[in-house]
Image: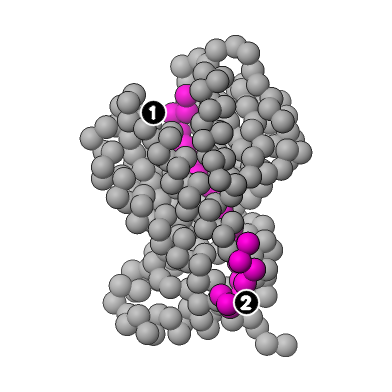
Amino acid sequence: MDLVYIENMNERELALITGASSGIGWEFASILAAKNTDLVLTSRSTTKLINLKTTLESEYDIKVWIYPKDLSIPDASLEIHDYLKENNLKPTILINNAGFGDYGLFHQADWEKTEMMINLNILSLTHLTRLIGEDMVQRNSGRILNVASTAAFQPGPLMSVYYATKAYVLSFSEGIANEWKDFGVTVTALCPGATTSNFAEAAEATESKIFKNKKLPTSREVAEHGIKAMFKGEVVSIHGFINAALVTSVRFTPRSIIRKIVRNIQEKNKP
């Protein structure tokens, strides 16, 4: 289902946000709408996107386009890019927020779900960044925010593939940030820790020590931090002082110890 405006774009900012229908993605959209930024929003849920579009357009003087799509499907990023071109939409901001995790031993995981996670967290993010980023490079301006994680800085037993995908996002973002700095395009990797959102439920990790009975930052707090970092042109931005300290400590701790620590905090509390 495509809801499209006929009139041409004006000169103000236009942000494309993936995974926009809930959690941090929803907050990204709300924050940018308040900054008078027009939006193109995509996620799997048509209903949630319509509700978000209605809410933001009623509260702010902006335009919102929605494109419901499952980005874990091959060529989904290309379809989104084609949709943008067909409707003369030229994002000045790209926020790659869509992603999910999975909890448990790797050999017991459902392979279809694992493959979808890799496709969404890595393949679609990379392809969309290439498609939108190339347009930005040609215009010599643009901002890209890729949502990585503090998980990117170490291996993650019991969520091994998820941690590995976020390590990719971090490394990839740093690499192209350097490549594109001379073309007026900034690339920021946002690295939040555990956050109050629907991530833990989707990953079936609500009983993990990292989430259970913890006072976690809200999706709004993480999104606000990420937007500020993006506009400042930071390359890597870690949300929260404690998270930043822990990430720094990883550099000076033997990998064998890091693996044991992460395994311990990922374990579910015993009854």
Give the answer, above or below, for where 50 lies relative to 70: above
Farthest top residue in view: 7
The answer to whether residue 217 is seen in the rendering is: no
Secondary structure beneath dot 2 equals: helix
> Residue 101: percent from the left, percent from the top?
58, 62
Answer yes or no: do the residues labelled 1 and 2 have beta carbons within 8 Å?
Answer: no
Residue depicted at x 62% and y 72%: 109
Q: Earlier in the sequence, mark 1 or mark 2?
A: 2
179 and 60: which one is in front? 179
Q: Which residues are magenta?
A: 90-112
Magenta segment includes 28: no
The image's mark for residue 184 is none
Q: Look at the image and tell me in which quarter the N terminus lies.
A: top right
User: Identity of the amino acid at label 2?
Assistant: Gln
* Left or right for 27, reference 182: right
The image's mark for residue 108 is 2
User: Identity of the amino acid at label 1?
Assistant: Asp
Looking at the magenta stretch, what is its main secondary structure? loop
Farthest bottom residue in view: 271
Q: Which residue is mark 1?
A: 135
Occupied quadrant, residue 154: bottom left
Q: Look at the image and tell me in which quarter the C terminus lies.
A: bottom right
